[in-house]
Amino acid sequence: MKPVIWLIGGTSEGRLLIKELADYPVELYVSVATEYGAELIEAQANLHLLAERMDEAAMCAFIRQHKPELVIDATHPYATIVTATIKAACAKETASYVRLVRPVGERGSYTVLNDFTEAVDLLNQVKGKIFLTTGSKNLRDFTSVQDYAERIALRILPMEDSLHTALSLGYKPANIVCMQGPFSKEMNVATLRKFGCSFMVTKDSGSVGGFTEKVEAATAAGAHLIVIGRAQEEQGLEYNAVVNLLRTTYKKEP
């Protein structure tokens, strides 16, 4: 029997790892949270794709059933609860665990805040339109920004539930952009200028998540960038190190 690898997460580098593993003599199970995330992954011979959210009990059951030789946590750097759950399940079932970490962006001329509450407080002290690029999960937080429906333009994934969330919270349809990233500097500049935004709010998604392009775009468009910061994870491997681990442990088929 071929060894089993379980990769969790539909991030950009997660999808790159899936392609890397296409020619390895392994059975690859990949878990993503949504059907949309599954649609972004190309089919390959050794791939078994699962689109469902799992709690710790479900993860433990999966590990007992499929007995993965390696579990790769390639979830988003801000999905801290999911990472904690994966770690707990692997520890309980004594499964080998590797965290794929995304390095934080290099510091630049922008404001770094600890959380969304601080971002809302800052935005209530300034005037001007805002381009919000932090996703749909925290849209409710920004309804506390004064005149948010008029001031905030936002970009979210092209998913029905994300759009429903935005509309149900009172964001204006004309101010909503539904697109899949990451985005080029030019696209970000064009969007900032289209909505006349003086501020851009984002997460530190690292270079693979288009963070550098956002920094450059904000500078080019004359907008002030506000970044919801994150701590560099202490344990884990960056993408190239994970690839080296896989190449050392599993030999590609000729």
Image (cartoon, grey):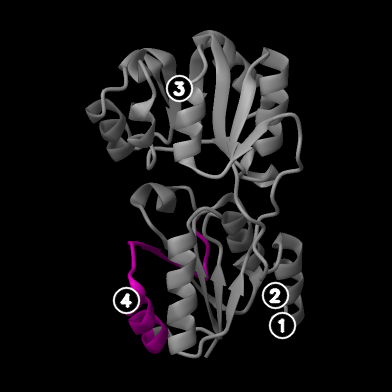
Instruction: Identify the residue position indicated by label 1 in the image.
Output: 249
Magenta span: 43-65
Identity, as a three-letter code, of the amino acid under mark 4: Ala
Label 3 or label 1, whichever lies nearer to me, is 3
Instruction: Name which quarter of the figure residue 250 lies in.
Output: bottom right
Tell me the CA gap for discs 4 and 1: 27 Å
Instruction: Name which quarter of the figure residue 245 lies in.
Output: bottom right
**Residue 163: x %, y % from top left:** 31, 31
Q: Is residue 61 magenta?
A: yes
**Please, what secondary structure does the residue beneath circle 2 have?**
helix
Label 4 or label 3, whichever comes before in sequence order: 4
Label 4 or label 3, whichever lies nearer to me, is 3
Tell me the CA gap for discs 2 and 3: 48 Å
Label 2 or label 4, whichever comes before in sequence order: 4
Q: Is residue 182 in sight in this rendering?
A: no
Instruction: Identify the residue position indicated by label 3 in the image.
Output: 124
Instruction: Identify the residue position indicated by label 4 in the image.
Output: 58
Label 2 or label 4, whichever lies nearer to me, is 4
Identity, as a three-letter code, of the amino acid under mark 1: Thr
Observer-nearest of 186 and 48: 186
**Residue 31: x %, y % from top left:** 43, 65
